[in-house]
Image: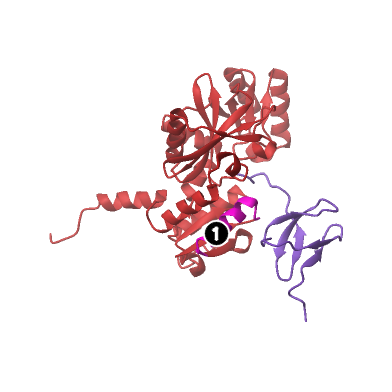
Chain colours: A red, B purple
Amino acid sequence: MQIGVLHARIRLEEKMIFTELEKRGVDVKRFHIEAVPLSLDADGAREDITQVDAMLERCISHSRALAAIRVIENWGVPCVNSWQVAEVCGDKMATNLALSNAGVAQPRARVAFTPESALEAIEELGYPAILKPAVGSWGRLLARVNDREAAEAILEHKATLGTYHHSIFYIQEHIEKPGRDLRAFVAGGEVLCAIARHSEHWITNTAQGGQVTNYPVTDELREIAVNAAQAVGGGILAVDLLESSRGLLVCEVNYTMEFKNSVEPTGVDLPAKVVDFLLEVAEGRELVPAQRAAAVDAAQQPTGGAS
Amino acid sequence: MSNTTETTTACPECDAQIKREEGVMANEILPCEECGAELEVTSLEPFSLALAPEVEEDWGE
């Protein structure tokens, strides 16, 4: 068996995964995304990539990762996570719609296309409201809008200074949280563990300095995390949750999860779990969405035989 | 002939000598202890470093 790892910069998470793969004696091939041009021609599949049994995507850039795994999966190599999942998770609006369609609780959200209609949406949700880029992470460029004056100023700045996708305004209901949010790590329908991220600041992302503690996997947390993971297509995922007066709400689902701060507090060997899941995909025991769809199509085909 | 076992190299920002630590991997990010620059390991043998790229808008999980 051979496993591919598509990566850019090597963070502690990737080192932990490489160490685990090496410990298990897995044949690993590394592909740096910046050094891997991909052909879109019918006969363009790269043999060094198609010979791997599964590709683990660990890139730092969402748009590059999405483009690359879309091509690689088209060549028949299952990717962890798959491009369909990456496409949904990498875009907050797509995540909202997937969760809405699956009946998973989440903060109310709006999308608007002009500062005027964005202001209207903010006022409908009520102050404070959250303005976020629809694609973005690590808690960057989030704004809590406390009143109309702040809303007008931020919307004008975004419309004037932002790149084109900042003129699509993504607005989310503000959830008053108890100084923390939660993250559940899910693999193939099972919750591996959960953490709470604490911060005095309203942004609790660990990339913004939030502190991490273990959080018990309650029935409520297990159910919503598994449902959210399934709603976006399944895989090995980190589901971010907010505690609210309406119960747990899904804030976002991460498809290239960062976990270095979660191993010690939870006592769960997350890099080993990533490798377990990856090997299950490589061995065909766990299917990525495209494989599941193909299996359904095959089952629906009339069986051959004499007419 | 170049020495492929070189284990120190200069910081591309401040020219401080940086030693290759055991276990370091290609494409890992190291900070320069002297100037604080973030450096990417571009090669292990010979050991070489480049300034790490700036964080882009779509980076992160």
What's the residue at 45%, 59% (across, down)? A77
Q: Amino acid at mark 1?
A: Val
> On the rendered image, what quadrant is the N terminus of chain B found in?
bottom right
Residue A177 at what x, y percent from top left? 60, 23
Please state which of residues A225 and A92 is positioned toward the viewer in this rendering.
A225
Residue A295 as seen in the image, left or right of residue A108: left
Give the answer, above or below, for where A127 lies relative to B61: above
Q: Which residues are magenta?
A: A9-27
Q: Pointer 1 indicates a residue of which chain?
A: A
User: What predominant SS class does the magenta segment belong to?
Assistant: helix
Residue A25 painted magenta = yes
What's the residue at 67%, 25% (across, down)? A144
Residue A161 at what x, y percent from top left? 73, 36
List the residue tagged with mark 1: A5
Regarding mark 1 in the picture, which secondary structure is present there? strand
Q: Name the residue at the front extreme.
A: A267
Residue A260 painted magenta = no
